[in-house]
Image (tube, rainbow, N blue to C red):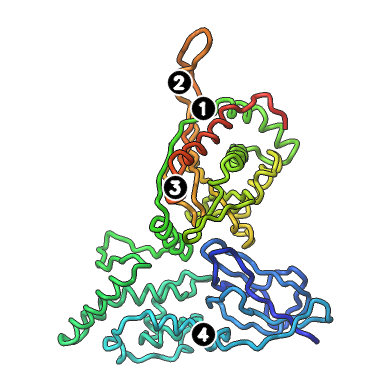
Amino acid sequence: MSKFELKLPRMGESVAEATLTSWLKEVGDVIELDEAVFEIATDKVDSEVPSEVEGILVEKLFNVDDIIKVGQTVAIIELNGEEGSAPVATIENDADPKAPKEAITAYKANQPMVKETTENIPVQDFSASDRFYSPLVRNIAKEEGITIAELDTIKGTGKEGRVSKNDILQYIENRRPAAVLQAEPATQEAVATSLKIEESSDLDSPTRETTPTSGSEEVIEMSRMGKLIAKHMVESVSTSAHVQSFIEVDVTNMVVWRNKMKDSFEKREGEKLTFTPIFMEAVAKALKTYPMINISVMGDKIIKKKNINIGMATALPDGNLIVPVIKNADRLNLVGMAQVVNDLAARARTNQLKPDEVQEGTYTVTNVGTFGSVFGTPIINQPQVGILALGAIRKVPAVIETPEGDFIGIRSKMYLSHSYDHRVVNGALGSMFAKAVADYLEAWDVNREI
């Protein structure tokens, strides 16, 4: 019987690793083609990884909460026949869940020299706990002298409350100031100096407050996705020179048309007709008119994208955001756009997106009007160079110009807020793009058929 290596697939340009959140199959289970074998989580999406072959699962090379690099072998499947088989390569020790050497080495390299404060703490046998801890978490606990009783008090953000690498590192970081206070007087100054050097040199992570809280305060641990989103937002602000252009749009004709068509559209197509696909159609047309917005930056080079792939920021039930991507948006008619928008939004909220559905975006749209905001100043989704925020549609009094004269009337209006990277997009281009979206919406044909 030949064997097949099931590897962690590529999940996007900026995604190099993922966390294994659960196994859906056990050793000995029969696996069908395209059947999900395990679940992973990245900063962009939680997803199932399917099998590329049929066979029997004979070996699992990682444990839950382990960090896996793209391209690493995660499982071995024994095939029933020769078709689709691939030789099994020797598995490096770094992929062995009993010896996550690469992760431990990387962890050690970034730790300050404060061992004097923890080396005398006895480390208990992990088998004494009823709680599951991954090999990486156990090794970090041993290195830091964390007892099993102490480890059991850490609140886990992993599946079923398991402690992840980020959880234990966060705990250690918050624990250090207390350890410094317990150090001998002669060593306090040296330890404090070490911590100050670490804080000043670690530019990749924000300084965290360690002030003790009173009984009137509640400390809430950020979720794994929340931590990653926060990191990416800070990186985006430090990477791109953000500047904004705002434009007010009269969308009265669009609103009237949509209200007239929505019931017949749903009855005929089985899909709800929201404003989102209309906005996406307008953005796709504007990107086609101004292709230098549909770019990314790599060092001192500009990468011009041929495909128009629009990211659609979607709010999740836990308060976080995810950005599924509408691929080749300029090639979809309004019916197709509505189907894709509804499908991606529904599966995003139920955690059923596939990795390739949140990658390769070339421009992003976010609807802040959903929450009542008139306009916003969104942060660019790297490595893109622009993001458009859609404000709330409101009925307002407005001056209406006619051949017979001007008068005041009630109109449906909204604001478009365009954030763009001023390194490569100047104010003229950024403003003209927003104006193109506005012109398309204002010129909406109330007699349009779909």
Disc 4 marks a residue whose amino acid type is Pro
Residue picked out by circle 4: 100
Q: Looking at the image, do the residues carrying marks 4 and 3 touch, with CB atoms under 8 Å apart?
A: no
Q: Is residue 361 above or below residue 180?
A: above
Q: Which of marks 1 and 2 is nearer the N terminus?
A: 1
From mark 2 to mark 4, how far is it between C-alphas?
65 Å
Q: Which of marks 1 and 3 is nearer the N terminus?
A: 1
Q: Which residue is drawn at 45% across and 15% down?
A: 408
Q: Which is nearer the eye, 163 or 95? A: 95
Determine the residue located farthest toward the top in the rendered image: 404
From mark 4 to mark 1, how far is it between C-alphas?
58 Å
Residue picked out by circle 2: 398
Q: Where is residue 189 in the image (x, y as percent from the top left)?
A: 18, 81
Disc 2 marks a residue whose amino acid type is Ala
**Residue 423 visible to the viewer:** yes
From mark 4 to mark 3, how far is it between C-alphas?
39 Å
Q: Is mark 3 on a helix, strand or loop?
A: loop
Taking the image as shown, residue 123 lies to the left or right of residue 35, namely: left
From mark 3 to mark 2, how far is it between C-alphas?
27 Å
Q: Position of residue 409 (x, y in %)?
A: 48, 17
Q: Which of marks 2 and 4 is nearer the N terminus?
A: 4
Taking the image as shown, residue 75 lies to the left or right of residue 218, namely: right
From mark 1 to mark 2, how far is it between C-alphas?
9 Å
Labelled disc at residue 378 = 3
Q: Is mark 2 on a helix, strand or loop?
A: strand
Q: Which is nearer the eye, 160 or 69? A: 69
Assess disc 1: are there few (<14), some (14-19) or many (≥20) residues with their C-alpha within 10 Å of its C-alpha: many
Q: Which residue is drawn at 63% across and 87% down?
A: 91
